[in-house]
Amino acid sequence: MWLRQSTAVDVPIGPFLDETDGKTAETGLNLTQPDIRLKKNGGAWAQKNAAQTLSHEENGYYECSLDVTDTNTLGLLKLAVHEAGALPVWHDFIVLPQNVYDALVQGNDLLQVDIAQWLGAVPSALIAGRVDSNTQVIGNDVITGASVASSAVTEIQSGLSTLDAAGVRGAVGLASANLDAQLVAIAGFIDTEIASIAADIATLLARLSAIRAGYLDNLSAGAVALQASVDNLEGRLTLARANLLDNLTNLDTAVSSRPTAAAIRAEIDANSVDLDTIIGHVDSVEANQTTILNRIGAFTGAGVNTILGFLKAMMRKDLAAPGDLGGAYDPATDSLEAIRDQGDAAWGGGGGGGVADWTAAEREQIRDALGINGVKTTAVGGQLQGLMGGLGEFTVTITVREAIILDPIPGVVVTIRNQAQTSKPFWGMTDVNGVVVFNLDAATYAVIIKSSFNFETLPPQVLVVDGPETPIYDLTRQAVDPPADPNKCRVLASVINTRGNPAAGVQFIFTLQTTGTAEVEDTTFLKIDQITEPTNAQGQLDVEIVRSDVVQPVLPAQSVQWRIQCGELSIDETVTLDMATFDLGVYIIP
C-alpha cells in the first residue's frame, strides 16, 4: 500500500484472529498507541506517534491513525501488532514523495520526468517545437578556407617554429662537427673524382689537337684512347654515384639511430642526480667508518680512561679510578664489589627486618615512601600487613547493608581519604558479609562508597576515628529501567581507579560465542557482529545487547551465549543474557 510522505492517514489493520483457533475474528481488543509498533525504512522499532485507542470496524479489522511524524520517512514502513489473545498482525507500506504520490494516485501533479521539470522551468522553444540549446559539436567540412580569416592563418603560422640546419642537428643530438665531417668527406671524394675526369679530358683535347695537326698515325691510337677514357669516365661516375648514395644512406641511418636531444638531456640530468647521491653516500660511509673506529678505540684502548676501563672501575674495588671520570669516585668504597661487601655486613646484622620491630626512623621512612599518614606502623614477622587498608593504629570495621531488609551487600568498593579528599586513598571491597576492614590513625576521613547500578549512590560520608570504629552504611535499592526494545538486555557496570575516581574509556567487548549465529526477526536473518563499548565519563558501562533467548542459531548445536572481555580488567567470561538487565558490578582498574 502506498502512503504520502508526511501526511496523516487512516489505514485499516487486521484481521485480528483468535490465537487458539486461528479463524474467529477478535472484535473487542483494547488496542492503544503503545501496541502499534513501527519500523521506518530499516530504522529502530518504535511505537506510533499519534495517541489513539483503535476502534473495531468489522471482521477483526481496526482503524489505525498515522500522523505526519509516522509517515515522515521515505521507503518501507512496517506496522506490526502482537496483542494478547490474537495472532500477530503486520502490514507493509511504501512511503512515496508527495509529488510522486500526487501524480500516481491523486492525478493532480506531474512526475519529475516531465519537460517542465527539466531546468525548473519550461525551456525556450524554436520553430517546429524544437528545444533551444548550445551547439557542442561541429560537423565535418563545416569550416572552409573562405570562412577562416587571413589574420587567423598568420597567427597560426607565427606560432610554428622554423626548422634550419642547426635546428636539425640539435634535434637529433649531433654536434655540428659530426655533420660537417660527413659533408667534408663527401666533398673530398667528389673533388678527387672531378680532378681525375679533368685529366682525362685534357688527354682527349691533346689527341684532338694531334688530329688537327695531321698526325694520322695517332688517330687510331687516339680513338682507342678516347674510347677507353670515355669508358673510364663512365665507370668512375657510376662508382662516385654509388659511393655517394652509400654515404648518404649511412648518414641517414646514423642520424635516425641517434637519441633525441630531450632524451640525452634527461639521461644527463638523471646521472648527475645519481652521482650526487652516490658521492653523498660515500662521504657518509667514510664519516661513519671514522666514528666507528674512534669508538672502538675508546672502548678497547689501553689504560683506565676508556669505556672498558670505566666499567671495570665501577665493578671492582681493587682498581684505580679513571682520571677522566672526575668527582670523588673511589672504587675501594664506591664500586659494586665494595657496596656488596658493605651490604653483606649490614644484612648479616639484621637491618630493618628480622624479629625486631621497625625503628621509629624506619617507620617514618616507609610511611613517607608509601604516602601513608599517621605515626604508627606495625611489623609482624618482618613484613607489612594490609597496605591498601592502611597501617594506622585503630581497626575500623565497615559494614555495608541493603536498607530496610538489612542484608549485607558484597562487592562494594569502599575508598577512604582525608576529609578534603586530597590524600592518597585506602581502599577495599566488602566480602560476602558486606564487611571490609581498615587500619587508620586518629583523624577525620571521607568514606566514598561505590556500588552497582542496583543501589543509589551514597554521597561521601564523614568518619571520625579516635579509637576502634564499626560504622554501618545502608544503601537504598533502586529500580533499573529495562531497555525500550524487549528483545534487548541492558548490561551495566562501573569502573573506578584506586583513588576512587571514575575510569572513563575502558573498553568492553561483547561477542556471540559461536560464529554464524543469526537473530530472527520475522523471516529476515540478521548477522550479529562483535560489539565494543567504552565506559563513559562517569566510569559507567551502559549498553544494550540482543538477548540470548531471542537469538536462534543457524545450526542447532551452536551456542547463543555472549562472551564478555575487558583486557584492562582481565575480564573474560561467558554468560547467557536472557533477562532485561544484567549488572556486572563494580571494578577497580589498577
Image (cartoon, rainbow, N blue to C red):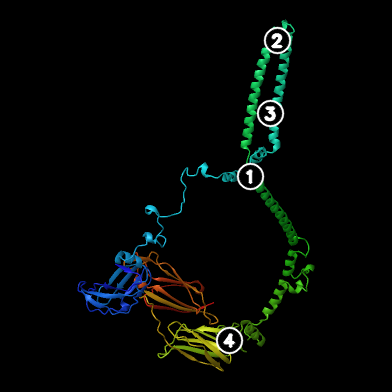
Give the position of the N terminus as an image quadrant.
Answer: bottom left
| Side of 135 where 35 appears, left or right | left
Task: Give the total of numbered labels.
Answer: 4
Amino acid at dot 2: Gly
Amino acid at dot 4: Leu
Vertical side of 369 occupied by 193: above or below: above
Q: Residues within 10 Å of mark 1 (few under 14, many from 20)?
A: few
Alpha-carbon span between mark 2 and mark 1: 62 Å
Q: Which residue is mark 3?
A: 186
**In-front residue for pair 227/391:** 227
Q: Residues within 10 Å of mark 3 (few under 14, many from 20)?
A: some
Alpha-carbon span between mark 4 and mark 3: 114 Å
Task: Kindly indicate whether the residue at mark 1 contacts the one at mark 4 (C-beta within 8 angstroms).
Answer: no
Alpha-carbon span between mark 2 and mark 4: 146 Å
**In-front residue for pair 397/201:** 201
Q: Which mark is residue 262?
A: 1
- Residue 557 visible? The answer is no
Q: Nearer the viewer, mark 4 or mark 1?
A: 1
Q: Which residue is mark 4?
A: 391
Q: Residues within 10 Å of mark 4 (few under 14, many from 20)?
A: many
Amino acid at dot 3: Ile
| Side of 578 where 214 appears, left or right | right
| Side of 280 where 380 appears, left or right | left
Mark 3 and mark 1 lie on one chain; the one further toward the N terminus is 3
Mark 2 and mark 4 lie on one chain; the one further toward the N terminus is 2
Q: Which residue is mark 2?
A: 222
- Residue 111 visible? The answer is yes
Q: x and y percent of residue 380 in the render? A: 59, 85
| Side of 161 where 479 appears, left or right | left
Q: Secondary structure at mark 4?
A: loop
The answer to which quarter of the image holds residue 168 is: top right
